[in-house]
């Protein structure tokens, strides 16, 4: 698997990142270990988790991080890069931001304890709180970095205008600032009109920012919850997937992209999974898709895309912008 160095860091990460949101909760410890082992065996070293993960299950908040701690202790793998996230609103009050130093440091300390590590390689703010000045946020994060609690920091679900502001302030502070952004992004365009309004999907403005600045994107839901594959297999879409990717608003666009996917698959011999992930990786700036397999079989399917990177022409053709 390709290994790339994230710009402005010394983090050497695999071309795919393994998302672990359900590990230790909906996915058993044994199956989680099997997927982690399989990912590393194929050259993967980049793991994504968060303080909030599994808070929606009986296993409870922090289950993913604690599972990773068990695996790290049992396997002692080399060169693993761990990314975690904090500052997520409480699930019962999503409109209430959690960006105070007390909130974020509390999440960070909990993650350090859950993971059993002294420092987190890449620490994301899981959400933004536009009511808090960006300068205050960067000063807080720099404090965590100076204390050795994080090596680098990044943002997730931040809009382009706030990221641009953060970049400008970071330059004035003479610090690296955000070294990556984690948006909701896949070949399938989402319709979030009835969903979580704190999410920030990739859009034209954010895409332009990444293209202009070279800021790496590490997208989540990179395969759109299997949207294209389920259509190809003739399977019924789950209600949440249908509402997000097959609504009246986005269905024509996404079905058109599905048709072009099928055509390109026939021409190249690549699977839909390889094309969907290769489309992301084919952009002009660094892109490391987060995969979220729920089984070893799904992991193996995603890993077949590890070295696939589409050309600029193919990227444009699939998007319908050629």
Image (cartoon, helix red, strand yellow):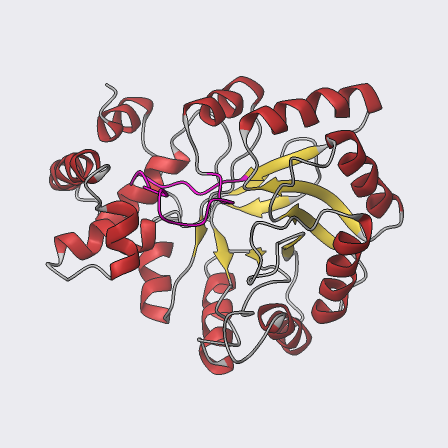
The spot of residue 92 in percent (x, y) is 56, 63
Residue 187 covered by magenta stretch: yes
Q: Is residue 176 visible?
A: no
293 relative position to 3: left or right: left
Q: Name the residue at 60% across, 74% down.
A: 67
The spot of residue 109 in percent (x, y) is 79, 62
Q: How many marks?
A: 0
130 relative position to 229: left or right: right
Q: Nearer the viewer, residue 199 or 230?
A: 199
Q: Name the residue at 48% across, 74% down.
A: 32
> Looking at the picture, does residue 275 appear above or below residue 164?
below
> Looking at the picture, does residue 290 appear above or below residue 262?
below
Q: Residue furthest right?
A: 147
- Picture quarter containing residue 35? bottom left
The spot of residue 315 in percent (x, y) is 30, 28
Q: Nearer the viewer, residue 54 or 197?
A: 197
Q: Is residue 191 visible?
A: yes
Q: Nearer the viewer, residue 162 or 90?
A: 90
310 relative position to 5: left or right: left
80 relative position to 233: left or right: right
> Most prominent secondary structure in the magenta stretch?
loop
> Looking at the picture, does residue 84 appear above or below residue 65?
above
Q: Nearer the viewer, residue 8 or 51?
A: 51
What are the residue bounds of the magenta stretch? 182-200
The spot of residue 306 in percent (x, y) is 40, 48
Q: Name the residue at 71% across, 63% down.
A: 111
Residue 59 covered by magenta stretch: no
Name the quarter where the C terminus is drawn.
top left
């Amino acid at each position: 698997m390709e290994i790339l160095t994230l710009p402005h860091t010394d983090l050497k990460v695999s071309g795919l990142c393994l998302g672990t949101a359900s590990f230790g909760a909906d996915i058993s410890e044994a199956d989680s270990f099997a997927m982690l082992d399989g990912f590393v065996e194929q050259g993967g070293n980049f793991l994504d988790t968060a303080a909030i993960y599994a808070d929606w299950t009986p296993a409870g908040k922090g289950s993913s991080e604690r599972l990773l701690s068990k695996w790290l202790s049992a396997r002692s793998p080399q060169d693993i890069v761990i990314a975690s996230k904090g500052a997520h609103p409480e699930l019962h009050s999503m409109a209430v931001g959690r960006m105070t130093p007390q909130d974020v440091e509390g999440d960070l300390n909990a993650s350090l304890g859950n993971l059993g590590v002294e420092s987190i390689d890449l620490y994301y703010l899981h959400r933004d709180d536009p009511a808090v000045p960006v300068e205050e946020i960067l000063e807080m994060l720099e404090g965590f970095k100076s204390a050795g609690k994080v090596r680098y920091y990044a943002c997730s679900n931040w809009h382009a205008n706030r990221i641009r502001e953060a970049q400008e302030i970071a330059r004035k502070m003479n610090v690296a600032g955000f070294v990556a952004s984690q948006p909701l992004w896949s070949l399938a365009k989402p319709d979030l009109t009835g969903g979580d309004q704190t999410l920030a999907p990739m859009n034209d403005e954010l895409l332009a920012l990444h293209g202009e600045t070279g800021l790496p994107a590490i997208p989540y839901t990179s395969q759109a919850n299997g949207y294209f594959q389920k259509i190809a297999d003739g399977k019924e879409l789950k209600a949440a997937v249908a509402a997000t990717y097959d609504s009246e608003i986005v269905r024509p666009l996404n079905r058109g992209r599905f048709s072009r996917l099928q055509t390109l698959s026939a021409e190249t011999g690549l699977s839909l999974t390889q094309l969907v992930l290769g489309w992301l990786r084919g952009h002009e700036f660094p892109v490391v898709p987060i995969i979220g397999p729920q089984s070893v079989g799904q992991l193996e399917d995603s890993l077949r895309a590890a070295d696939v990177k589409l050309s600029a022409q193919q990227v444009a053709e699939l998007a319908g912008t050629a």
